[in-house]
Image (cartoon, rainbow, N blue to C red):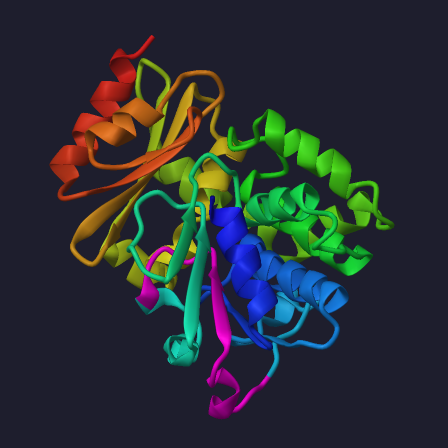
Amino acid sequence: MKHSEIIQAITTHPTIIIHRHIHPDFDAIGSQIALIKTLQQSFPKKNIFAVGSDVENLEWIGSMDVIQDYEYRDALVIVCDTAEMKRVSDQRFKLGSMLVKIDHHSNGENYGDVSWVDPSYSSVCEMLSDLFFSYPETFKLNDEAAVALYAGIMGDTGMLKNGMAGERTLRIVSQIKKFTFKPDRIHRLMKKSGTDFSKWKQLVAYRTEVTEEGIANLRVTKEMLEKLRLDSSEAAPLIHALTSYIPARVWVLFIEEDGKIRVRIRSKTLPVNEIAKKFGGGGHRLAAGALLSSWEEADEVVEGLGKKE
């Protein structure tokens, strides 16, 4: 069981350093801050750090530490919400004595001495919440950790509206809400920090195609990314703009990256994970993704979704 392996690693290392991916979103920052706040509360004698570039509009969740290389000596390094090693913010994560990966993306690189990857969770913040609530004798949460967990889950589930939230998600959110914070305030801060997708409204309106079967699909090419001055990871939130502004049965976002096509699929009721699996991907029943080799395969994804009842 990954829980026991992770707890063993945490309890046996005097120094713990937490990383996440570049261009962080709410789940990346939220999982980092929730983990550091919980571990500091639970293990006050340990040296615990969160590292990576600071993100100004997310500093209300928490800020990063600046540490020297020697801190990695004999340290446990935990990387949150990062499918591939090249996307870890601060590549010193390799300097520790033990590496743990915690992620909910199904199409990632296999790395870490311990790798807890489970795409059945909406977010890494949901994974950590489940871990913390399952072992209350080990982990002591506080209000700061609860805010970070809540923000991460809300971010990756589109405020519980994009199909990523299941029964477990709702149960965990209800547990988090028992702590002292105001969800409405978090929602306002998140909107100011980048979950207001109005800036994408025109792009989505003009570029999205909706088939007769109700499959809305937006194709973001390399040239479009360059024009928008975005990289592929920064364009990923467009899936939330799609679900917010385009009436459809299923929403599909294609983003060109490194000669491949990353597809993200969301649905209200139609199961979409089987289509993703057909192309080597996976995910949840109503939220899935895959990495395609060509735009022709993108056509096949849309066609396949249109045939599903």
Asked if residue 266 shows in the view, the reply is: no
Residue 233 sits in quarter: bottom left
- Relative height, residue 28 to residue 210 (above, below): below
Residue found farthest to the right: 180
| Residue at 28% in and 16% down | 306
Q: Is residue 81 above or below residue 64?
A: above
Toward the viewer: 160 or 133? 133
Q: Is residue 51 left or right of residue 182?
A: left
The x, y position of residue 271, in whole percent, is: 39, 19
Q: With 38 as the anchor, is 295 left or right in this view?
A: left
- 119 lies above or below 191: above
**Image spot of residue 18 (x, y percent):** 54, 69
The residue most toward the top is 309
Q: Position of residue 212 (x, y in %)?
A: 31, 14
Range of magenta residues: 66-85
Quarter containing the C terminus = top left
Q: Is residue 236 highlighted in magenta?
A: no
Viewer-side residue, 12 vs 300: 12
Q: Is residue 161 visible?
A: yes
